[in-house]
């Protein structure tokens, strides 16, 4: 059974601070990792993907991957109230076009 | 408009009725997926299709069927709906043959209530 674990939160962060979201996964053969943002009542939106160990930066977002520790994280710098959402970690273990395994998500609240 | 469309947006259905949820994408992605999202359980894969003419079972396929007659459409059918199928259903697609990675893009979802 492939599992992806996230702290459900809520994680409360002051505006302008760095929000740190974490995710662990069980399948050591996992190859691709994704972060989705989901606003209440809306569909998941892909914001970051990462495939190699280390950091990947895109604007205010940085994804970090450590395959040895089976750990993925997402950092959001200069957090804005509009970043308040649920963040879903997803893992692709198949290496092909089969489904992703999703964590249950972390609810992030940015306090103005 | 490029992207994924789903219909209906929401539906209330009597138990035992048959229902087809529609999903269409115009991005020419090879792969399509159906997920359900339930509070406390997250997103779970129902069925997927790697390419037109092929389908596969996901984590929770019982009570659902799919078909992939062409690249663009991937309907999900509930043959005889039960209350436990009350959920939000998301269709997604990816172009893994072009990129080699499985970045999936989601439709707006269908909220289904089975009474």
Image (spheres, rainbow, N blue to C red):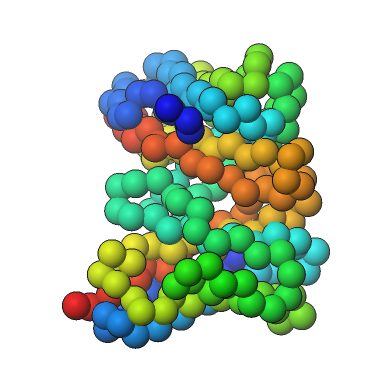
Q: Residue A68: in sight, yes or no?
A: yes
Task: Give percent across and percent down for residue A83.
Answer: 33, 67
Residue A104, placed above or below residue A56 = above
Where A53 sits versus B74, above or below?
A: below
Q: Residue at x 76, y 47 (%)?
A: B100
Quadrant, the C terminus of chain A: bottom left
Q: Percent x, y for residue B114?
A: 34, 30
In the image, what residue occupies the spot 73% across and 27% down? B51
Residue A68 placement: quadrant: bottom right
Question: Is residue B76 visible to us here?
Answer: no
- Residue B28 left/right relative to A94: left
Q: Quadrant of the N terminus of chain A?
A: bottom right
Between A5 and B2, the residue placed more toward the observer is B2
Q: Nearer the viewer, residue B12 or B69?
A: B69
Measuring from the top left, give residue B68's x and y in whole percent. 65, 20
Residue farthest along the front direction in this orientation = A59
Q: Name the residue rendered at 33%, 55% in the picture.
A: A39
Q: Is residue A11 left or right of residue B98?
A: left
How many marks overall?
Answer: 0
Whole-percent x, y for residue A31 in the image: 75, 61
């Amino acid at each position: 059974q492939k599992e992806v674990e996230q702290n459900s939160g809520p994680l409360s962060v002051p505006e302008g601070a760095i929000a740190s979201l974490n995710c662990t996964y069980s399948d050591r053969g996992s190859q691709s990792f994704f972060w989705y943002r989901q606003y209440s009542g809306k569909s998941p939106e892909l914001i970051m993907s990462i495939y190699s160990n280390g950091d990947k930066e895109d604007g205010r977002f940085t994804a970090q991957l450590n395959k040895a520790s089976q750990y993925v994280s997402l950092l959001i710098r200069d957090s804005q109230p509009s970043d308040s959402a649920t963040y879903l970690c997803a893992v692709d273990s198949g290496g092909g076009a089969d489904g992703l395994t999703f964590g249950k998500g972390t609810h992030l609240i940015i306090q103005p | 408009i490029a992207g994924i469309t789903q219909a209906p947006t929401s539906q209330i259905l009597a138990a035992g009725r048959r229902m087809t949820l529609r999903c269409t994408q115009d991005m020419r992605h090879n792969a399509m997926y159906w997920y359900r999202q339930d509070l406390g359980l997250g997103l779970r894969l129902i069925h997927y299709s790697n390419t037109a003419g092929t389908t596969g079972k996901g984590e929770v396929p019982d009570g659902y069927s799919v078909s992939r007659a062409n690249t663009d459409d991937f309907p999900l059918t509930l043959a005889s709906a039960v209350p436990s199928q009350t959920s939000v259903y998301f269709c997604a697609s990816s172009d893994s043959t072009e990129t080699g990675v499985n970045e999936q893009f989601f439709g707006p979802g269908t909220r289904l209530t089975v009474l």
